[in-house]
Image: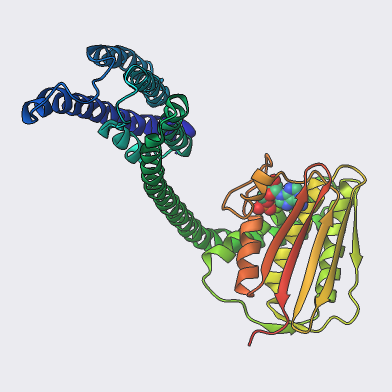
């Protein structure tokens, strides 16, 4: 799905949350004030006692004045600002109201804190937004703190303490929401990746059977023809090269399509890497670069699938070569780590990879090259995982990349 579609869906969710917020805000505000100023006086003997709202009816008017602005902003798709405007406007009005109420009435002990404040803090998580939560929590608690400092009244400590506790409850709910949503989206992404892989697997099996055999027949005929027709030496090598290119793509696809596990045998990795370095050297020379192989002393025999390991080294070395500027170098080598693990590294001084792209390496079809397939790393990762190893990337943009393969020596 495109970012645009995601953006629209998020907007729809925000509109729903804002509408719910507005309904509850006005219903609670009106109902609470009716209760306090009209119903409660009927139930007590001396209704004139106790503090009265200083702004009184104007509090209503000034809050309802925001409604047309909220409707306008929702229509204009500026819905994300509505909740902030409300909390800021309400906090300022309420602070003013409190100060007016008590500054003129020093004798009355401070008794304040409306159910609307509780609603604002407790329902802040419906927007699933940490910044909004902090604005609500700090402005509500801060309102009581500021009036306490101005009025020099110790009783303001009570609402401050109550709203700190409510904020903690609300914060816990918010972090639970966020973590739940994050888990759901990673599960969804994983499923998506697996689905993609399953499709690629099916396509791969078909390609494997339908393309491989005719392709090798074609390659044989071209070789035969090139031996007969010695006068033409430009097109045959190109044809053979292109067939090899198709073959490597088919090889990559076959690994995904084939659920067969690797066949482990004891292999000398020094020899395998040396062989692949030699095979890929002409490619590097074409780019004006070179491949340097550093043989590893004391390397034990490694239990691995020779063909699959060759495929991994070709993929990694090809990527390294393709990242190089003219005259660059790829260094390939291995090291023994302890008694049961070895490390193979492919290091280049090429273009490097930035940290955002680094996270995407190994995703099916992820490529930044105009002619890339985005299969090489995915296949290499799968092969290494089947070998119970690890494929690690270290890279610095503009400086180069080092890919490390960690492999166990044995598999029992
Ligand atoms: P492809 O080579 O077909 O693009 P890969 O799966 O082999 O597919 O690689 C995916 C992407 O990872 C490449 O397109 C490139 O952007 C990046 N990449 C891999 N190795 C390197 C490297 N050594 N240096 C820079 N970028 C690399
Ligand atoms: Mg590649």
287 with respect to 160 (left or right): right
Q: Which of the 4 image quadrants contains residue 292?
A: bottom right
For the rendered model, the colour scheme is rainbow
- The quadrant of the rendering that contains the N terminus is top left
Q: Please provide percent x and percent y for residue 383.
A: 63, 68
Residue 306, compared with residue 372, is above or below; it is below
Q: Residue at x 90, y 48 (%)?
A: 328
Q: Please provide percent x and percent y for residue 63.
A: 29, 17
Q: Residue at x 50, y 56 (%)?
A: 200
Residue 86 in view in this figure: yes
103 with respect to 227 (left or right): left
Q: Residue furthest front?
A: 107
Q: Please provide percent x and percent y for residue 33.
A: 19, 25
Q: Residue at x 39, y 30 (%)?
A: 8
Residue 117, compared with residue 336, is above or below; it is above
Residue 50, compared with residue 237, is above or below; it is above
- Which of the two residues, 235 or 362, is positioned nearer the viewer here? 362
- Which of the two residues, 165 or 368, is positioned nearer the viewer here? 165
- Which of the two residues, 266 or 175, is positioned nearer the viewer here? 175
348 with respect to 161 (left or right): right
Q: Which of the 4 image quadrants contains residue 163?
A: top left
Residue 239 in view in this figure: no
For the image, the number of numbered tags is 0
Residue 296, compared with residue 188, is above or below; it is below
- The quadrant of the rendering that contains the C terminus is bottom right
176 with respect to 343 (left or right): left
Q: Please provide percent x and percent y for residue 240.
A: 75, 54
Q: Which of the 4 image quadrants contains residue 215?
A: bottom right
């Amino acid at each position: 799905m495109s970012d645009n579609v995601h953006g629209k869906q998020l907007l729809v969710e925000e509109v729903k949350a804002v509408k719910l917020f507005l309904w509850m805000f006005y219903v609670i505000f009106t109902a609470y004030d009716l209760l306090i100023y009209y119903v409660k006086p009927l139930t007590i003997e001396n209704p004139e006692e106790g503090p009265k709202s200083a702004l009184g009816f104007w509090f209503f008017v000034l809050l309802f004045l925001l409604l047309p602005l909220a409707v306008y902003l929702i229509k204009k798709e500026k819905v994300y600002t509505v909740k902030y405007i409300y909390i800021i406007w309400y906090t300022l009005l309420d602070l003013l109201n409190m100060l007016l109420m008590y500054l003129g009435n020093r004798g009355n002990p401070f008794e304040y804190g409306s159910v609307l404040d509780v609603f604002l803090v407790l329902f802040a998580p419906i927007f699933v937004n940490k910044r909004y939560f902090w604005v609500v929590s700090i402005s509500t608690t801060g309102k009581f703190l500021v009036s306490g400092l101005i009025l020099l009244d110790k009783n303001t400590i009570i609402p401050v303490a109550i709203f700190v506790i409510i904020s903690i409850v609300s914060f816990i709910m918010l972090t639970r929401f966020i973590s739940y949503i994050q888990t759901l989206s990673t599960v969804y992404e994983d499923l998506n990746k697996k689905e993609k892989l399953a499709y690629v697997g099916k396509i791969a099996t078909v390609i494997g059977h339908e393309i491989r055999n005719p392709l090798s027949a074609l390659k044989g005929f071209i070789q035969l023809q090139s031996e007969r027709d010695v006068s033409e030496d430009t097109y045959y090598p190109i044809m053979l090269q292109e067939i090899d290119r198709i073959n490597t793509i088919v090889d990559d696809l076959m690994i995904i399509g084939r659920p067969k596990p690797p066949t482990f045998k004891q292999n000398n990795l020094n020899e395998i890497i040396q062989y692949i370095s030699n095979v890929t050297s002409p490619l590097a020379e074409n780019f004006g670069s070179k491949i340097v192989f550093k043989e590893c002393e004391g390397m034990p025999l490694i239990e691995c699938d020779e063909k699959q390991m060759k495929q991994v080294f070709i993929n990694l070395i090809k990527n390294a070569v393709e990242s190089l500027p003219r005259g660059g170098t790829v260094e390939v080598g291995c090291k023994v780590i302890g008694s049961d693990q070895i490390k193979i590294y492919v290091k280049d001084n090429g273009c490097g990879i930035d940290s955002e792209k680094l996270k995407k390496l190994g995703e099916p079809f992820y490529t930044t090259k105009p002619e890339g397939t985005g299969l090489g790393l995915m296949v290499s990762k799968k092969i290494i995982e089947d070998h119970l190893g690890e494929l690690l990337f270290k890279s610095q943009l503009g400086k180069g990349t080092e890919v490390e393969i960690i492999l166990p020596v044995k598999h029992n």
